Image (cartoon, rainbow, N blue to C red):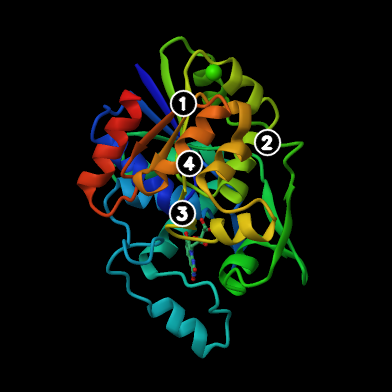
Amino acid sequence: RQVLALSGGVGGAKLALGLTQHLGATELTVVANTADDFEHLGLSICPDLDTVMYTLAELSNKEQGWGIEGESWSCMSALAELNGPTWFRLGDRDIATHLQRSQLLRDGVSLTETTGQLNSALGVSYTLLPMSDDPVRTFVQTAQGELPFQQYFVGEQCAPEVTGFYFQGIEQARPQPDWMQLLAASQLAAIIICPSNPFVSVDPMLRLCGVREAMRQSKAPVIAVSPIVGGSAIKGPAAKMFTELGLGCSAIAVAEFYGDLLDGFVIDNIDVEQQAAIEALGIPCLVTNTVMKTLEDRALLAQQTLAF
Ligand code: FO1
Ligand code: CA
């Protein structure tokens, strides 16, 4: 039995950790978005890969959602004294991750292999794959013009009104091959779309050449967990984006966004009155608690999603 989880940052990583409570190291593969990646201070930074890695390694900073718990910030302080850029905060231990990854990439090691080496070193036994070894970069189109993703997200704190997205490199990028192989494998039992941002975390993965088709043709059911609960997002700008794009902000809007890709959809108890409308779209719905505060919440949601 094999389970595949597609994940962005925080929300996806939480469900991935829940899945590890039920699946052995050889049974779970997590594919993470790399369209948030960027080069900063000469370093290759992969926020979603690192959020999943630190979460599975139980090193993550839970309040912040990104980075490492108990970080020190000596390098950032020194950088500030030198009038260097401090808008994107890099902790001392986190910098070691970026230094090692950047060096491996410069040596010609693929992002897949690099990610594998970093995860093994931190004791993560599950397979974590980048969605592609080729660069894809999200640009957020806003009323104030087009912004590189991290400039929109961290620099502007998601304030500018969103009108659309552009994924630079998406046409040329090849989806990670082990991921494509798994989609075609007969042992694949489920494809879980984690409760991550549909526009900027999941859509880049789905837009890679051949991915939607391979997911549709897979014998495994595609099950998404709604990142929108009670009309808002647990974390991040998903709710704001749904509203600004005029799509309405609800679990139904998420189901419509994924459309015919879904064989099942998991929504929160608070959204139970949307169940009938989603099922009318031909998508069976599981209604449960999807707000993951504790490890028990994560494990229970993972178990119910697997059973569904
Ligand atoms: N998010 C912030 O809001 N502020 C930061 O200073 C910041 C630094 C940072 C450093 C490394 C890393 O892997 C992630 C970091 N993030 C930061 C989070 C990240 O940029 C976003 O959460 C994701 O790209 C969205 O999924
Ligand atoms: Ca299918």
Question: Residue, x 41% and y 12% (percent of image)?
Answer: 187
Identify the amino acid type marked 4: Gln
Q: CA distance from mark 2 to mark 3?
A: 29 Å
Identify the amino acid type marked 1: Pro
Mark 4 or mark 2: whose residue is earlier in sequence:
2
Q: Is residue 2 visible?
A: yes
Q: List x then y, in percent, for residue 208.
A: 67, 34
Residue 192 location, quadrant: top left
Relative to 92, is 222 above or below?
above
Q: Which residue is mark 4?
A: 274
Q: Which residue is mark 3?
A: 100
Considering the image in quadrants, where does the N terminus appear?
top left
Q: Could you say which is closer to the camera, residue 216 or residue 207? A: 216
Relative to 251, is 77 above or below?
below
Q: List x then y, in percent, for residue 266.
A: 42, 36
- State yes or no: discs 4 and 1 in contact (Cβ < 8 Å): no
Q: Is residue 26 visible?
A: no
Q: Which residue is mark 1?
A: 284
Considering the image in quadrants, where does the C terminus appear?
top left
Is the residue marked by circle 1 packed among few (<14), some (14-19), or many (20+) residues within 10 Å? Answer: some
Q: Could you say which is closer to the camera, residue 103 or residue 263? A: 263
Q: Indicate which label's residue lies in the foreground, 2 or 1.
A: 1
Label 2: which secondary element: helix
Q: List x then y, in percent, for residue 292.
A: 31, 50
Mark 2 or mark 1: whose residue is earlier in sequence:
2
Say whether residue 303 is left or right of residue 134: left
Say whether residue 108 is left or right of residue 267: right
Task: Using the image, tell me which numbered label, if any, was put on residue 207.
Answer: 2
Q: CA distance from mark 1 to mark 3?
A: 44 Å
- State yes or no: discs 4 and 2 in contact (Cβ < 8 Å): no
Label 3: which secondary element: helix
